[in-house]
Image: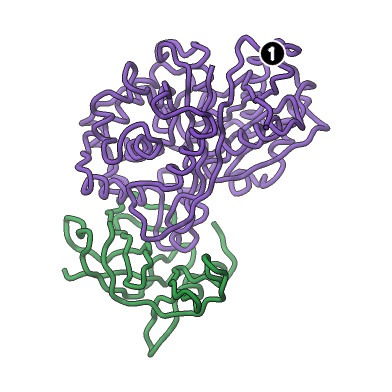
Chain colours: A purple, B green
Amino acid sequence: MADKVFVVGVGMTAFGRSPDRSLRSLGREATLNALRDAGVGPRDVGVLVCGTARSGMLQGRESGVGQLVGWELGINQIPVYNVKNYCASGSTSFDVARLAVASGEHDVALAIGLEKLTARAGKGATLTSDGMEIEGDLGFSPPAYFGMLARRHMEQYGTTREQMAMVTVKNRRFSAHNPYTQYKDQVTVDEVLAAKPIAEPLTLLDCCPTTDGAAAAVLVSERVLDRLRVRARAVKVEASVLRTGIYEQLKDMTTFELDVRSSRLAYENAGIGPEDVDVAEVHDAFTIAEITHYEDLGLCAKGEGGQFVESGASDLGGKVAVSTSGGLLTRGHPLGATGLAQVHEIVMQLRGEAGERQVDGAKVGLTHVAGGFMENDIATSAVALLSR
Amino acid sequence: MTRLPGEHALDQQVLRKSNERWRLVGSRCASCGKVFFPPRTLCADDLTKCEERLLSTQGTVYEASHIRVAPVGFTAPYWIAYVDLPEGVRLFAQLDWRGDEPPRHGDAVECTVRVVRTEPHEVLGPVFTGPQ
């Protein structure tokens, strides 16, 4: 039986465009915030895990970002694991930290995720994807994939462009109350539809932006909760599941088998059902993605995701508030930081510290990242369930 | 992204010349008969060594999109699609399409091989055309 694991501190930088800041500067700020939030010192940390996706390509630091951030804060000598797993690099960092504590090997683990994505070439051009070498040479981009997914969803289930736009409208409303997000100005459904076309039918406001940022979390074992005086604000990790795809080619594009599989396993491990989830952070890299995730994560029935957002079921006061942080669409998506920014939001919600975007009485929260592409399918799925 | 000459060269990986014509090549498991694209060395189901197999030039559109903002190395607008081939594979490709509306799910298309990008290096790849 694995040891129980708790998140006792979270921290992040404000997400946005930070061309003048270095990886070490972003990582230092987020990690220091997490340590201070937990009230633990650098010498208390027994293991450090660091997730980035593009630091090799963009900053010439393929390895050793974890050591770099650790050095900034006097965290040394301890084991450091640097992990790279597409958009799920931050979630992977979280999961490895969880494993380190659950195994009984370590009592205090630091999970860090960061990315400085504005350093990429081609301002305004769409991001490419690792894992799609051949398709990349043919003009593939993530918006192309989700543009096609949107058209399939519209044809198969009658989902409308307006319903997709409502995801952005909702997430911008949340974003206005979150100090860490990139875009806070409010938009209407009409403005989303009339924005610059990217990959039809998706417009600029259906897609997440290019962003820099870092986020971190402190995970501890049950046996040190009292010694470190962190029990009062501890959030329990009920489940954390990381899985990869089966890469089936002739798949129904409107559902991700991988997300269905990883979320069902997370619910099973936690003994918690989707109906128990009060607040969820999902991988809303595109508006249609959030709609698809409602369905795959079991928050609504297959094909009803468009209606789910339109009815307000994913808004504050609805069945389950989704992307209360503002999501990837408005907070931004610094690849390696996203998974831990999601943990940051869920921890704030479960501690009742989310201010204007607080879900009343939130007891159970979910985080979900669908990371990267591999042979026409998503490559990685990470689902965690947290409770307080 | 700079690449060494020949690295990831699409024509070496997925195209073969047959009767003076470029054709897409996949692989077929000698044991279970499953066809894969892109080609792979071993069958994912039983690890049997696969053999090369030229793929059909006729396929059907699974879904398509008009790309209005391109990744680096491409010039928008252009059409892309997922095309299903009768062998049971789906591939991403550009589409030579003149209509205002996208092709419909199930529309028949035919594979041609053309230059699909020129920067940072010239790439030969599949472009599907439909009845215009």
How many numbered marks does the figure carry?
A: 1
Q: Which residue is mark 1?
A: A39
The image quarter in which residue A123 lies:
top left
A45 or B48: nearer the eye? B48
Q: Is residue A324 above or below residue A116?
A: above
Q: x and y percent of residue A53 in the render?
A: 58, 44
The image quarter in which residue A300 lies:
top left
Q: x and y percent of residue A384 in the render?
A: 53, 32
Asked if residue A118 can be seen in this view, the reply is no
Q: Is A25 on the left-hand or right-hand side of A282?
A: right
Q: x and y percent of residue A254 in the render?
A: 32, 47
A325 or A238: nearer the eye? A238
Q: Residue furthest right?
A: A77
Q: Secondary structure at mark 1?
A: loop
Q: Chain of mark 1?
A: A
Give me the residue at 67% from left, 20% from top. Answer: A32
Q: Amino acid at mark 1?
A: Gly
Q: Is B77 on the left-hand or right-hand side of A38?
A: left
Give me the residue at 53% from left, 49% from top. Answer: A244
Q: Is residue A286 above or below residue A248?
A: above
Q: Quadrant of the N terminus of chain B?
A: bottom right
Q: Is B131 on the left-hand or right-hand side of B118?
A: left
Asked if residue A30 can be seen in this view, the reply is yes
B47 or B24: nearer the eye? B47
